[in-house]
Amino acid sequence: MKRSLPFFCFSLFLITSCSDDPKINNEIVLRHSPLTQAIYFSDDSLLHGISLGMTKEDVKKLALPTDSLSQEEADYLLYEGRIDSFKNYTWDCEFDSAGLYALTLDIYLKDEDSPEVWFNDLSGYFTEKYGQGTDDGVALTWEVKTGKRPARIELMEDTEYIYGKLTVYYYDLAFIPMEKDTLPMDSLYLFESM
């Protein structure tokens, strides 16, 4: 019996190492908060395995089972997700002929007056992944020059929201966004009734 244990362990190692399951690269995200891990479970993409340039069908396949599709149009998707009873998020995607060109993530922290701790954790995650960001006084910004569509990432705290709220914008570097002070408050009170 004792001689079969090393053989069993070696066999188990051999079977698991030969698996066809892709390995998830999450080395950086595992050094951050559970909130960051719940949203960014892979270091190889922008969000949930999604990258700019993907087709609408590919993005839909990567939505988490816990995320619900709230709105779908020819060039638009809106999802709602829940981390726990006090932490919710929405993410919406905009598409053009070349695929996904913009993604907005709103994180609602209903049990906190300020999202400062989470803001610092997310900015630390992005800095580890993409290098030092720039601060324009409104948002921290990073540029990602790799992938199908190089991206700009903007992280900001929404001080207008009644609780803590963070917004992350991902968009194609070739895309010129609206001025930040004219952005619609499309999902400001989406989770008030939850």
Image (cartoon, rainbow, N blue to C red):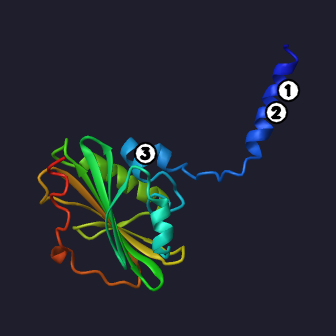
> CB atoms at circles 2 and 3 under 8 Å apart?
no
Q: Position of residue 32 (x, y in %)?
A: 43, 45
Please tell me which residue is depicted at 45% across the width and 65% down the height of the picture.
60
Foreground pick, 73 / 174: 73
Please tell me which residue is depicted at 30% across the width and 59% down the height of the picture.
90
Q: Quadrant of the N terminus?
A: top right
Q: Does any portion of residue 44 appear in the rendered image?
A: yes
> CB atoms at circles 2 and 1 under 8 Å apart?
yes
Residue type at mark 3: give it: His
**SS type, badge 3:** loop
Q: Position of residue 152 (x, y in %)?
A: 39, 73
| As drawn, 46 above or below 39 | below
| As drawn, 145 above or below 19 | below
The answer for how far apart the CA atoms under marks 2 and 1 are is 6 Å
* Residue beneath disc 1: 7
Write down the quadrant of residue 165 in the picture.
bottom left
